[in-house]
Image (cartoon, coloured by chain):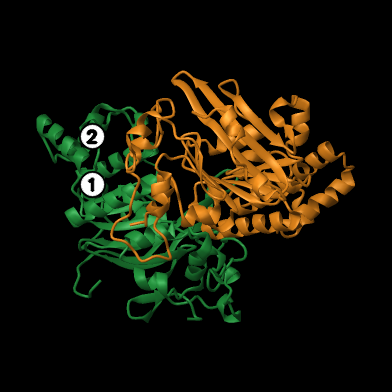
Amino acid sequence: MFSATWLAKLPCSASIQGVRDLLLAVRDLKTYFFTAAGTVRAVDGVSYDVHAGETVALVGESGCGKSVSALSIMRLVATPAGRIVGGEIRFRQRDLLTLDEEAMRRIRGRDIAMIFQEPMTSLNPVLTIGRQLTEPLEIHLGMPTEPARQRAVELLTLVGIPDAAQQLTRYPHHFSGGMRQRLMIAMALACNPSLILADEPTTALDVTIQAQILELMKDLSRRLGIAMVLITHNLGVVARYADRVNVMYAGKLVEQGPARDIYARPHHPYTMGLLRSVPRLDEPRRAKLYPIDGQPPDLTQLPPGCAFAPRCRYAIARCQDEVPPLRRVGAEHLSACWVAEQLGSEAPP
Amino acid sequence: MTATSTIILQVQNLVKHFPILGGSVFARSIGAVRAVDGVSFSVHQGETFGLVGESGCGKTTIGRCILQLERPTAGQVVFAGQELTGLTEARLRVIRRKMQVIFQDPYSSLNPRMTVGQMLAEPLQVHGIVRRRAERRQRVAELLAEVGLPSALTERYAHELSGGQRQRVGIARALAMQPSFIVCDEPVSALDVSIQAQIMNLLDDLQERYGLTYLFVAHDLSVVRHISDRVAVMYLGKLVELADWQRLYEEPLHPYTQALLAAVPIPDPEVEAHRERIILRGEVPSPANPPAGCVFHPRCPLAIAECKRVVPEFREVKPGHWAACIRV
């Protein structure tokens, strides 16, 4: 199992480079849900860094804990069932988990903004677009009405919504899915945050609109120097937009590293399986796909050892009863697998 | 597909308009959503015909019109030599044994109050396929084995199954009728990546074993490429391109197909770093008020003045390769 002392010794990529400005450091985060069916360890000892201006992906399948990990950063985990039971979330050296609710509210939407998958459920249907954009400006930044209105027009223009001034009096239902997501991005940008948590921001959108929105987010993040935590199940989106990647399975990080290393030399059987199971447009068509066998794990009944072991073709006896810790397999590349060293050299079938 | 292969399904000038109702006291039609607007294609025996497009393009409506779950506004659907659009429900019931459907979300298409065994036994009984109870039980066990589910699941309810298992039950239920043709409507898009590949391989195996013909409706271009023999691309109620899979993906003719393919991110950062991006402007217009001329012209990077006036003919540009664009 993870232990706090072991984690303290964990090579953190910031210390290697030294020069990068560490914005967010998640350390041994544990968020559990206490349900009638048992304790669900949705996030179970997860550690990762986000540096200023970079895009970090949290990738995994449904139920792996990637969304709960982001909600934990905002301290928006649904209570009373869900509770952050351990760890640290240091944002600019301050541990968010120790802040009082008032201090936390000043950070939410101002320093850290969040974009959700389904914009319609995160927009207020009875408030105009203008009101939804000016409210955070007035509350967080204390802007007077008219400058706030001007800033709202600026923000809408920035995210590519045409005739911005005319849009202020309209309502969310007047907008298409793609336009609503642009609106969410405008709201996220309102107070010049340094970090945006984007939870499946384009999953509900069509592929041509998805491309528009992701290009927009990448462009804004570059121009405004905003760091992004991109939460997605789409390996293509991660490859196109992320600088560094964290792969999650059953509440734990199983692999972590620079995007190029993860894709070129995956060192965890789950990552390898994910990459192999998706058909690719740029490769010759295969007769059969290579799925990952078995079913996704039941978080209330995880095996004592590695959670992926029941589906893993490389599993050895040790995997059944000992949880593998994240270990270094490359300069900034970590894998939580007992046989990681053997995997790196193996060519994909 | 060779010219000698048999055509199992022919769709001719299919039109489906949904009326938009208005009026203060009496509802009257004040317009129409042109979900499907004059679509023709044929599907050959034993092939997988991929139908791809973005949400709202009409691909699902085509599938439903073929099955007559939705009655077409105009046009013909000829299945195994029989024109379906004028048939009564009673006649259709007999034919539907041969044409089945697999839905996107197996959770909403399975009865929450029935066990897996009951769900599979019911159609066998209703259609009089297996009359004796003991034999039905035997057949249910066979169907479960067929789709790779343990027989222990017979007594389970849908909510006790994982997404992949539920989709397998959906497939088993379609198979129970021993169909020759199955409309697969986004069968893997609700599933996790690692499970998608399992279901795709299963569909592939079943096709081989029973000589099934699939109409595979999906928005995921990589998935459609993997499974299809021929592929048609839809945009705003119309087919814009149709070709065998290799040519459609390697030499796409229509600017919309080209943009769609360029928009799909490839899971490899090295490839992505050097890839050409075609980012389409704007959004898909409303099918209630489609643009004049070519429906794609407001977003098309190649559009010229003529495209605003002329409705492009869906023509055979190269043998077996059809496209609706005056610029190709």
Q: Judging from the image, what is the letter of the chain drawn in orange?
A: A
Q: Give the side of residue A74 with respect to residue A305, left or right.
A: right
Identify the residue at image location x=18%, y=48%.
Answer: B178
Residue B59 on image: x %, y %: 41, 57
Disc 2 marks which residue? B150
Residue most toward the top?
A36
Tell me if mark 1 has few (under 14), some (14-19) or many (20+) residues whose alpha carbon lies within 10 angstroms of its own: few
Foreground: B83 or B316? B316
Q: Is residue A106 above or below residue B322?
A: above
Q: Give the side of residue B256 with respect to residue B163, left or right.
A: right
Residue B260 makes an appearance in the image: yes
For mark 2, name the chain.
B
SS at mark 1 in the image: helix
Residue A94 appears in which quarter of the rendering? top right
Q: How many numbered circles does the render carry?
A: 2
Identify the residue at image location x=44%, y=56%.
Answer: B219
Residue B118 makes an appearance in the image: no
SS at mark 2 in the image: loop
Q: Check disc 1 and give the amino acid type.
A: Arg
Residue A115 on image: x %, y %: 64, 44
Q: Judging from the image, what is the letter of the chain drawn in green?
A: B
Residue B268 on image: x %, y %: 49, 59
Residue B191 on image: x %, y %: 41, 44
Tell me if mark 2 has few (under 14), some (14-19) or many (20+) residues whose alpha carbon lies within 10 angstroms of its own: few
Disc 1 marks which residue? B93
For mark 1, name the chain.
B
Which quadrant holds the N terminus of chain B? Answer: bottom left
